[in-house]
Image: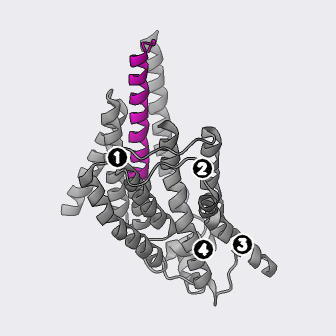
């Protein structure tokens, strides 16, 4: 009973975080939701008795990809600010 | 017009999703029982964990190509960024630096454990390499490690070492007729050798995907 409730909670949270990630207009929030989705996905893999995939998902899917996306976001922001300083059209 | 296009897009998307679910539900049963076959031959694979046995022994060819693809991705990234001068590390946050210094030995220990554990429980070269890469990214974010510019000779060797070791083992075993068919007696040692090289190289490659990009930006 408990595990069933947990699984349903996991399913709802997965769908919710995926939707928030795609629908969010704020890129920063979308990246954070992507990381949340990756960690929930790792939990889902662990629940499906696939700990190998869960480890890879947590480390590569959520961790490294999330860091790369945040880095790309920072680069975009820095470029936009640099452009504003030089007075060019956005 | 815009609303019509959006409606058509959503309609096509929903239809595709329904078709996929229906196709999944009507999937025929597998012709051969693969988990049973793996369990049957596990004793000859040199490791006790079925996932590692499949990745490094039964389907070693796939893993070899996977590593090649990762290496190719990094080479493409380097080609796009071109050779640029090294960039100084970002400004330091003492608290983050202290944490990174404390965490680094644990991260390396964890990577070593995952590599060793791969033989008999979940773990292995990919996970260990990802943990190593996370350590490098942490160091870079804490300002302890400068972003990488064009790789020097040592770094190039490190990036390709895992692939080269894997390829060398595959080539050495070619004389027996089949590609990557380890002799059962030495399979465990060969797999550990390949995985150790892969851990180092995958760690550097995954870290490079982050560190080379960051260096290019600044």
Judging depth in this view, the residue of B206 and B190 nearest the camera is B206
Cα distance in 3D space between marks 3 and 1: 38 Å
Q: Nearer the viewer, mark 1 or mark 2?
A: 2
Is A83 one of the magenta-colored residues?
yes
Question: Horizontally, is B192 left or right of B153 in the view?
Answer: left
Tags 2 and 4 on a common chain: yes
Cα distance in 3D space between marks 1 and 4: 31 Å
Cα distance in 3D space between marks 3 and 2: 21 Å
Q: Position of residue A86 (x, y in %)?
A: 43, 16
- Magenta-highlighted residues: A61-90
Element on which disc 1 rests: helix
Q: Quadrant of residue B105?
A: bottom left
* Residue position for label 3: B168
Is mark 2 in CB contact (under 8 Å) with mark 4? no
Q: Mark 4 or mark 3, which is nearer the start of the sequence?
A: 3
Subunit under mark 2: B
Is B91 one of the magenta-colored residues?
no
* Residue position for label 4: B194
At x 70% / y 78%, what residue is drawn? Answer: B181
Relative to A84, is B172 above or below? below
* Residue position for label 2: B74
Is mark 1 in CB contact (under 8 Å) with mark 2? no
Q: Position of residue B187 (x, y in %)?
A: 62, 83
Tags 3 and 1 on a common chain: no
Subunit under mark 4: B
Q: Residue furthest top?
A: B1
Subunit under mark 1: A
* Residue position for label 1: A35
Q: Position of residue B120 (x, y in %)?
A: 45, 80
At label 3, counting other C-alpha atoms closer than 10 Å, the crowd grade (few under 14, some 14-19, many 20 or more) is few
Q: Position of residue B9 (x, y in %)?
A: 47, 24
């Amino acid at each position: 009973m408990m595990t069933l409730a947990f699984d349903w909670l996991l399913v709802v949270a997965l769908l919710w975080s995926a939707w928030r990630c795609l629908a969010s207009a704020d890129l920063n929030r979308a990246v954070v939701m992507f990381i949340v989705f990756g960690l929930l996905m790792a939990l889902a893999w662990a629940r499906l008795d696939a700990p190998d995939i869960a480890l890879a998902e947590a480390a590569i899917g959520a961790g490294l990809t999330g860091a790369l996306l945040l880095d790309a976001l920072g680069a975009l922001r820095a470029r936009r600010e640099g452009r504003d300083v030089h007075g060019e059209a956005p | 017009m815009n609303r019509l296009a959006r409606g058509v897009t959503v309609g096509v998307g929903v239809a595709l999703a329904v078709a996929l679910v229906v196709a999944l539900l009507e999937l025929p049963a597998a012709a051969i029982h693969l988990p049973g076959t793996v369990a049957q031959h596990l004793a000859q694979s040199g490791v006790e964990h079925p996932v590692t046995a499949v990745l490094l022994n039964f389907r070693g060819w796939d893993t070899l190509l996977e590593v090649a693809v990762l290496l190719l991705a990094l080479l493409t990234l380097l080609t796009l960024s071109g050779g640029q001068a090294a960039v100084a590390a970002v400004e330091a946050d003492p608290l983050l630096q202290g944490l990174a210094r404390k965490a680094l030995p644990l991260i390396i220990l964890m990577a070593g454990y995952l590599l060793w554990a791969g033989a008999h429980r979940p773990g292995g070269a990919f996970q260990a390499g990802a943990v190593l890469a996370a350590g490098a990214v942490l160091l870079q974010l804490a300002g302890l490690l400068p972003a990488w510019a064009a790789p020097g000779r040592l770094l190039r060797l490190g990036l390709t070492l895992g692939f080269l070791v894997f390829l060398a083992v595959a080539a050495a075993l070619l004389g027996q007729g089949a590609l990557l068919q380890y002799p059962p007696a030495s399979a465990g040692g060969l797999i550990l050798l390949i995985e150790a090289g892969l851990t180092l190289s995958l760690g550097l490659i995954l870290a490079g995907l982050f560190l080379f990009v960051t260096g290019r930006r600044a």
